[in-house]
Amino acid sequence: MTRNLTRSVLIAVSVAAMGLLAPHATVAHAAGDGECTGDGACSVKDSDPRVPSSNSDKPKPKDEDKPPKLPECGSYPDARMDVPEDADNPEDWVQVACMEGSLRLVVWVEGRATPAQVAQSLLAQVQLEPIQIGLTPKSADPMTVVGMPVWLWVAEPSRTTWGPATISAGGMTLTASVESISWDMGDGTTLTCGKGTEWQYGMGDALSPTCGHVYEKQGRYTVRARSHWLARWSGYGQSGTIPVTLSAARQLAVGEIQVILTGR
């Protein structure tokens, strides 16, 4: 397929190739004309692309796109490079990572005195990541059409994108898992879902049984998925939770196509 094809033709071909267009699918109209052969096969020619262009298809990053940060070393006033020789209970001391300016250090702290801070350090060391967004159509530069169901799911969930992620050190244990995913579809619609259901080829234009959306207007939308983590920690007779939100985003083009069928 050559690059001089118009945007709307690319949309039509992309969706049709996926098997998403069914006889009962909702069809919207676009400016253009069509040509049909004697056997009833038709093509659409559109000189007026209906998907607005954008200077940049890359969503702008947000603070929540970044993983949890390591605490500052100054937050551990009794931190040492080594366990004190006169420590009453050397086994109570644990190693934690922290930041001294732009330098990452590993220091020893008395865990019993700062269990919540130790938990924060353990959480940062897990290196949680935003989910990989799965949506239909399945392509690197997805394009769909008005009225076509869009499925949403967590693609290739892993220990660091979905959980559970567990880490232990010196009598402290922390386990983090995603509790839910909130979706901002870019058109004012928000959804809260679990892992979702992955769309497979051959499923056609059915609605997702767990998490999906249908666009009513053409445009270029930023789909943002916020994964809401909850890290549960325990140790030294104490316990607690740490909430974390990470987000990822993708661009989705939604166009309008016109299908022309003629009989001869």
Image (cartoon, rainbow, N blue to C red):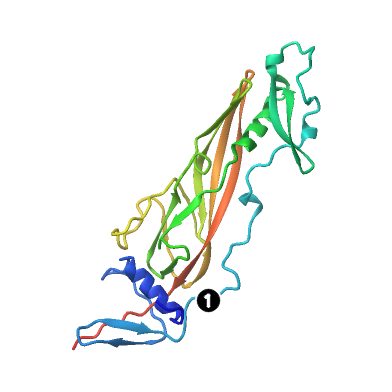
Q: Residue 216's spot in the image, x, y percent?
A: 43, 69
Name the residue: 74% across, 24% down.
Answer: 109
Judge from the rendering whether residue 259 lies leftward or rightward of residue 123; answer left or right: left
| Quadrant holding the N terminus | bottom left
The answer to which quarter of the image holds residue 18 is bottom left
Is 85 or 73 nearer to us in this picture? 85
Judge from the rendering whether residue 188 lies leftward or rightward of residue 9; answer left or right: right
Note whether 37 is above or below 55 in the view shown.
Answer: below
Q: On the image, numbered disc 1 is attached to which residue?
A: 52
Name the residue: 44% across, 87% down.
Answer: 47
| Quadrant holding the C terminus | bottom left
Name the residue: 81% across, 28% down.
Answer: 77
Could you tell me which secondary element the residue under label 1 belongs to?
loop
Badge 1 density bin: few <14, some 14–19, many ≥20, Cα 10 Å: few
The answer to which quarter of the image holds residue 138 is bottom left
Q: Amino acid at mark 1?
A: Pro
Is 20 or 124 nearer to us in this picture? 124
Is 245 or 201 nearer to us in this picture? 201
Q: Residue 62's spot in the image, x, y percent?
A: 64, 55
Q: Residue 245's spot in the image, x, y percent?
A: 59, 45
How many dots with numbers?
1
Q: Residue 195's spot in the image, x, y percent?
A: 43, 46
The answer to which quarter of the image holds residue 126 is top right
Name the residue: 41% across, 49% down.
Answer: 196
Note whether 19 is above or below 78 in the view shown.
Answer: below
